[in-house]
């Protein structure tokens, strides 16, 4: 049986490298984005994945793997924004690569810890799921997140924004494990 923790770490390294390289190339310009804007970016990624799955092909050379990486990384950005707040000025946008990488590591490893606990309880059910079904669940989580945002973060009985971002990270990571590590077609 596959070692989920090791596979998750392999995928973290892949996503983290993309995140860090983009932080070097673009800086942390994303710090200006409010949470609904980040949620919309996640939606764009998930919707493109679903569109490719339904059509059976991509017209743009990039397939669905970079989109799942984007979901992971945008969710981490949202979690960072929840902690440090949205930058209000150009001066506040800039965050050094070391600091943003430390924050990335904090949230991606919190996501892994959550996944390991849930994975224990659910018995790795995700391994039997279709990637298209996981994509649909990510889209559902996005719509839940949008609803919570529309209610200014207030919920009656539901988990908050952070829980939904963590769940989206983990569902995207499951897909990446299957597509990148296990090389599922």
Image (cartoon, rainbow, N blue to C red):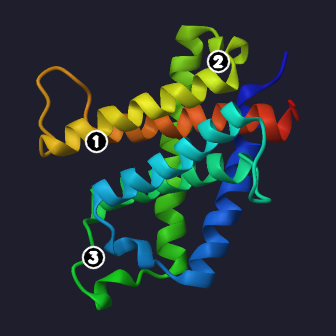
The structure residue drawn at horizontal position 58% and vertical position 31%, both measured from the top left corner, is: 135
Residue for badge 2: 126
Relative to 144, is 117 on the left or the right? right
Residue 146 — which label? 1
Disc with the residue nearer the chain's start (1 vs 2): 2
Residue 5, image quadrant: top right
- The C terminus lies in which quarter of the figure? top right
Residue 171, image quadrant: top right
The structure residue drawn at horizontal position 69% and vertical position 54%, both measured from the top left corner, is: 66
- Above or below, 25 against 163 in this view is below
Residue for badge 3: 87
Mark 1 surroundings within 10 Å by alpha-carbon count, few (fewer than 14), some (14 through 19), many (20 or more): some
Q: Nearer the viewer, residue 127 or 140?
A: 140
Residue 7, image quadrant: top right
The percent position of residue 38, horizontal first and vertical second, equals 38, 57
Relative to 185, is 131 on the left or the right? left
The percent position of residue 32, horizontal first and vertical second, equals 32, 74
Which tag is nearer the camera, tag 3 or tag 1? 1
Marks 3 and 1 sit apart, C-alpha to C-alpha, by: 21 Å
């Amino acid at each position: 049986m596959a070692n989920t923790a090791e596979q998750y770490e392999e995928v973290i390294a892949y996503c983290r490298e993309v995140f860090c390289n983009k932080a070097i190339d673009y800086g942390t310009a994303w710090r200006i984005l409010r949470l609904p804007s980040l949620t919309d970016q996640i939606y764009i990624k998930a919707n493109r994945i679903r569109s490719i799955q339904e059509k059976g092909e991509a017209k743009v050379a990039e397939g669905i793997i970079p989109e799942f990486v984007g979901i992971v990384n945008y969710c981490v950005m949202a979690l960072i924004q929840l902690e440090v707040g949205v930058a209000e000025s150009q001066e506040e946008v800039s965050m050094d690569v070391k600091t943003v990488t430390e924050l990335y590591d904090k949230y991606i490893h919190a996501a892994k810890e959550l996944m390991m606990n849930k994975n224990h309880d659910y018995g790795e059910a995700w391994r039997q799921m279709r990637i298209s079904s996981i994509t649909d669940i990510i889209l559902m989580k996005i719509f839940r997140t949008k609803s919570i945002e529309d209610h200014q973060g207030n919920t009656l009985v539901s988990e908050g924004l952070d829980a939904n971002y963590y769940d989206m990270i983990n569902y995207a990571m499951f897909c990446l494990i299957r597509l990148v590590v296990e090389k599922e077609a």
